[in-house]
Amino acid sequence: MKNKVFSVTQINTYIKRMFQSDYALRRISIKGQVSNCKYHSSGHIYFSLKDEGSQISCVMFANARYDGLKFELEDGQEVVVDGNISVYERGGSYQLYAQEIRLNGIGELYVAYEMLKQKLYEEGLFDHEKKKPIPKNPKKIGVVTARTGAAIHDIISTAKRRNPYVQLILYPAKVQGDGASDTIVAGIKALDQYGVDIIIVGRGGGSIEDLWAFNEEKVARAIYEVQTPIISGTGHEVDTTIADYAADLRAATPTAACELAVPDIREVMEGIINREYTLRTLLKQVVRRYQMKLQQYQITIANFDPRFQLQEQKMHLAELEEQIHAVMKNKMTDYQHKLELYTKELHGLSPTAKLINGFGYIEGSNGEPVTSVKKVMEGDQISLTISDGTIITKAEQIKRMDGIKES
């Protein structure tokens, strides 16, 4: 006997009726992680739910989306999906048809966190313009955290290492569980009234549930309303709470918050030494500038001092005198030289200069020079002038150059 042969459509329709007749599949809730989430232009959302061992295809139609989804569906979210499982005959596959999607556990806290953050942001609690400046040299620092635990020990050790002169004032508060936010608010207000310079609010790391006290609205408003600057250091570096946004300064951890609040005394001392060196250097430069200006003023004043001017004039007069003496000496030398030349020339022209070596000058009795023998008669008295005197004599005989005797 042969088995009956069915078409594909007949089988898929049969399987679909089986799914529809199963009461458990008609109204079911499935928990899982969202993956392959896609928003279609029609408004439908296609995604998968998966866990460590398996996955199931899901779809949420646009008409169910507006009532059954209160947040933006994204990959990685842990959700609970309410709906029914049926078969899509044309594709021959079964899938979960979602009617409502809600975040699971942590996801609900995350939605509350985001909604509160957006609300406080719109109110201006996170505005940077309203943040209070952190004092650079605080004397008293308040701490709102648990009495025991790593946070307070880290803060104390960090403060002692950085500056043992800073006073820490602890307000022990619950940082987790019921009533934690109330004690945190009370601590902030009490330390603000006490008059500390800075308040550190924080605790060590933990899950979002552990840190939830720092995500409550009353804590954020208390941080915003007090007059004392607040540094928030909650959880680990990756954790960010509402208190971090509301605080005047956010630190990654309680230890980092203490480092931001307490100045390192070694850095302060080094800064003082550097400032002292800079001040001395600048002072030396200023003094040197004024010394140079003083020297310039002294020179300027000296130029107008009558004694200095008289001294300058004396020096100038001495130089002129030396120049005059030098010029006069040169002139005298030139004149002496010329005089010697003129003397020699005159001596060469003087008749007496020729009377040396046996030469003489003859004058007649009438005192006129005898230039020819014709001017002298025998017996006439004549005078003969030679180099060292005059001889008076008479002409005994006169001879001409041609040998003729004058009578």
Image (cartoon, rainbow, N blue to C red):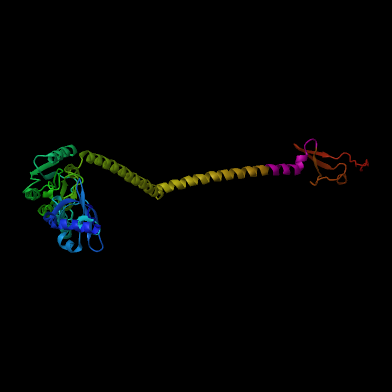
Camera-side residue of 210 and 299? 210
Camera-side residue of 139 and 123? 123
The quadrant in which residue 345 appears is top right
Camera-side residue of 269 and 11? 11
Residue occupying the point 18% across, 37% down:
161
**Quadrant placement of the C terminus:** top right
Residue 282 falls left or right of residue 232 = right
Residue 232 part of the magenta-drawn span: no
Count how many numbered circles sit on residues in the image: 0
Q: Answer above or below: position of 141 versus 88.
A: above
Residue 357 part of the magenta-drawn span: yes
Q: Residue furthest top?
A: 357
Residue occupying the point 12% across, 42% down:
168
Image spot of residue 270 (x, y percent): 25, 39
Image spot of residue 271 (x, y percent): 25, 41
Image spot of residue 7 (x, y percent): 24, 58
Q: Visible in this render: residue 247?
A: no
The quadrant in which residue 47 appears is bottom left
Residue occupying the point 20% across, 63% down:
62
Q: Visible in this render: residue 245?
A: yes
In terms of secondary structure, what is the magenta stretch mainly? helix
Q: Give the extent of the magenta segment.
A: 340-358
Image spot of residue 265 (x, y percent): 20, 39
